[in-house]
Image: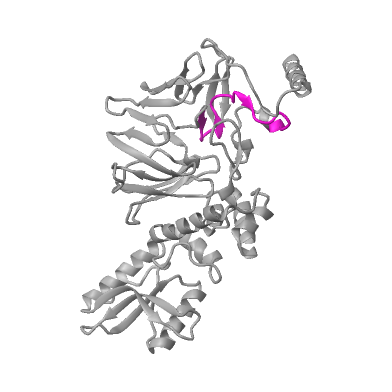
Amino acid sequence: MIWRVIAFWLAIVAVAATELPSSFVFSVCFCEVSFCCAGRSANGLKCAYDLCGNMLVGGKQSLVYNPENRLVASAVSNRVTTFGYADDGTRLWKQPPGTNGLQVWIGGIYEEKNGKTLFHISAGDRIVYTAFSSDGSAGEYYHPDHLHSAQVMSTNSGALTQHYEYTAYGNTRYTFSTNAFPLSRRYTSQVLDEDTGLYYYGSRYYDPVLGRFVQPDTIVPNRFDPQAYDRYAYARDNPLRYTDPSGHGPVDDALFNTGTIKSSYQLMTMHDTGWNKAWEIPAGVVGMAAGTADAAFNMMSLGGKGVVEGGIKETVKVGVEELGKVEGEKAGARAAERSLAKDVPNPFGRKGGLEHQARVNEVANDVKERGLDPRKEYQVETPGGAKESRFADVAGLDSKGNPVELHQVGRETKGGLPVARERQAIQDIKSATGQTPQFHPYNTTPPPPQP
């Protein structure tokens, strides 16, 4: 073992002393299937590799490569998935178990999956829309997080169809999906092979459970960076800041520093474990107290550029606003109320999260049962108030269209009072109309109806 360590460091010294460009390429390794290390474990999974460094066994999954080190087959519990490539190494097709699952790609534009023909539309190198028909009349929009991961998907009308959350290294930790068609691009906009659990990064495959590539990089991106010599590492082991679009080296992602509320919220809700919360919540709170998410990421040394081109920034802001119309969940509502109460707009829009919307629907149904016409998001002009106009969550109108009841839905404090934002809204509406809106908290269980 000692002589191997000595030989390794001698090789590093020899490489560093050689006049090479800042990045260089390893020669292609043609090898037979033989084990160079077996019985090793990572994240509790037993792993084995061939002499070229390709993972042959990862947990219960077996992987097979061709002489050019391209993955050509994967087997899990006798279910085999095969892959095909063009001469330049670009993947062309995947055949999952079964006869009707052939998936085909042509560039980043055309795809066939589960009997559907998909057309991907990108802005630069970022996919923004997938059309299910050639005229684009049906499809889904991508609402990404700060790493360009597909986080929320919506229809042309803005309806939420899919929602994904990821751990730092890309393992999916939360999934919400209607009966929407399952699109392939997920973490950092890379293609997820659901049959194998691996992501295809163009030049090699990545395992989000291990947080490492299953094949060594064929290049050293920067010979002056010691971390670049770990040929399996993903994004310099700093996945909150870097991505690796090509599988050949980290990229300092510009959208991580856009200053969007969504990125700060993502920081605060990334993991559920107490250890992660111990640093994630202070990071998000410090940033938002400074007034912008840009400042947060720069102060925490998680961002590199601090600013991006105005066009990209505006696109992200619009995306966040649209996201607010379709997305809602408990953690988001809590984070919005806790951290964005006064000076920053609610990132989930006026409709609020799922709990908020459910309570609004209950109030509206009650109003209707009592013979009034329920109107949601009823606008009230509030001159002299904190805002020029307010929106009562539900208004009960009489036969002449006059509001005889106003209802406000929101969070309640531990003391049983509306939170500050809701109290201000109720006061503004009361001053303008003379009516005090009835308040309905959605974070407490309403009392049972009286007989």
* Residue drawn where x is 32% and y is 34% of the image: 113
Q: Report if residue 74 is visible in the image.
A: no
Q: Main secondary structure of the magenta part?
A: loop
Q: Position of residue 11 (x, y in %)?
A: 74, 18
Q: Position of residue 181 (x, y in %)?
A: 32, 42
* Residue drawn where x is 55% and y is 35% of the image: 211
* Residue drawn where x is 58% and y is 57% of the image: 259
- Above or below for 338 versus 124: below
Number of marks drawn: 0
Q: Position of residue 150 (x, y in %)?
A: 45, 45
**Occupied quadrant, residue 28:** top right
Q: Report if residue 258 is visible in the image.
A: yes
Question: Which residue is most to the bottom?
Answer: 434
Q: Nearer the viewer, residue 136 or 157?
A: 136
Q: Position of residue 75 (x, y in %)?
A: 40, 22
- Above or below for 274 versus 18: below
Question: Which residue is most to the top?
Answer: 32
Q: Quadrant of the C terminus?
A: bottom left
- Above or below for 431 versus 105: below
Q: Is residue 42 left or right of residue 84?
A: right
Residue range of the region highlighted in magenta in the rendering:
205-227
Q: Quadrant of the N terminus?
A: top right
Q: Is residue 45 left or right of residue 161?
A: right
**Occupied quadrant, residue 263:** bottom right
Q: Is residue 49 magenta?
A: no
Q: Is residue 216 magenta?
A: yes
